[in-house]
Image (cartoon, rainbow, N blue to C red):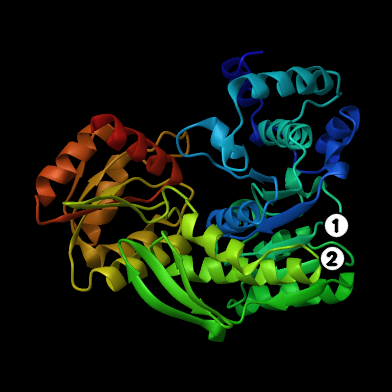
Amino acid sequence: MTGEEAIAYIWTHNWEARAPGLGRIRELLRRLGDPQKELKFIHVAGTNGKGGVCACLASVLEAAGCRVGLNTSPHLERFSERVRVNGEEIPDEDLGAVMDRVRPAAEAMPEHPTEFELITAAAFLHFLERRCDIVILETGLGGALDASNVIEVPELAVLTAMGLDHAAILGPTLRDIAAAKAGIIKTGGTVVSRGGCSEADEVFRRVCRERGAALTELDLSRLTVRRLDLEGTAFDFDPWEGLVMPLTGEYQAENAALALTALELLREKGWNIPEEAVRRGLKTVRWPGRFEVLSRDPVFLLDGAHNAHGMRAAVKSLEALFPGRRWTFLLGILSDKDAGEMLDLLAPLAERAFVLRPDSPRAMDPAALRALLAERGVEARPCASVEEGLRAALAAAGRDGAVCALGSLYLCGEVRSAWFKRR
């Protein structure tokens, strides 16, 4: 298969048509020789912050001389972003080659694997072929029944910030959602948690006790943010001083602190991670689409805030960086998100909004989104395309204004592609 053919094949097997469970991915990997059993993992689950934590971990470990696999989802602009080795996206020919192995195994099974199970198997094969020293593996949805949870005890299990998202699938309460995420905690494992959510923290502590796993919770008293601006973030994390990274947004320093806590635990396990690698890795980390500065004149920010928890973090960052500023928003939201709570958070900062339909079957109708904004006193105009939305938002804001695009990771990717095409 070509890379394009491999992607088309993967997308034909929608996960919603299959019952959740690990049976299919276990069977698929068994037919492929169980490549996951020859790899070492850092397994990352949570509601928000997974990508930023994964990016920090990957950058530092690469700076320390490791060959690092990184498996994240969803992608912003290209499917190949999901599977990387030392920052290099999986080449089309490699994706086609691994899917040539995965497809016959999948089609010989009584029940065909889902798209995410196919991607997971392909990623494991690629990481093994590239002889990765360690793989940073992000869950797709939840934890316990997520295809990524087919692995055995990882080097570390990392639990990022918790909030209400995918409640219809994972459960209606934070405790239900935390219980699903806690599925990545393995017997005798080593766990690091972001903490700060009492309902989730109780669940994680209980599961760690039951499974004999060692739990470390992030100590935010060690964190001091020294500078936060459009150039990035400077911070201390005792005893580390004078750390800098090009990521902006208030939440990024906390993501980095969680990654540093995880790296300290890896050091205790014998991984060689020099101080210079920590500093260099953070200084060079990239994670597009998360409070990304696309332009300073005029100000144009792009953020992947796609649920109420993420929107709260985005609004907090906007207020910290631009106190009192009113924004022109380019907005698209999925219909299964808590749009009302998201807009309650966003409306006080809005001067106007231009609304779009993200490229997803779950996208909210722009007319419905416009009506919700009108209820909150925000003038909004639907746009037929991302390109139209970009032009309209920039024209309305003017040279002295400020634009922020957010509301969906799908929209985030579309806006980013359109922005760089127009330049």
Q: Disc 1 vs disc 2: Cβ atoms closer than 8 Å?
A: yes
Q: Is residue 251 above or below residue 305?
A: below
Point 72% across, 55% down: residue: 43
Point 39% across, 55% down: residue: 339
Q: Residues within 10 Å of mark 1 (few under 14, many from 20)?
A: many
Is residue 144 left or right of 31 when viewed as pictured?
left
Residue in front for this viewpoint, 7 or 367:
7
Question: Whole-percent x and y of residue 111?
Answer: 82, 27
Question: Whole-percent x and y of residue 307?
Answer: 46, 57
Q: Amino acid at mark 2?
A: Gly
Q: Is residue 176 visible?
A: no
Q: Is residue 301 above or below residue 128?
A: below
Q: Amino acid at mark 1?
A: Val
Residue in front for this viewpoint, 264 or 360:
264
Q: Which residue is mark 2?
A: 189
Q: Residues within 10 Å of mark 2 (few under 14, many from 20)?
A: some
Numbered tag placed on residue 153 in the rendering: 1
Numbered tag placed on residue 30 in the rendering: none
Q: Earlier in the sequence, mark 1 or mark 2?
A: 1
Is residue 357 left or right of 62 when viewed as pictured?
left
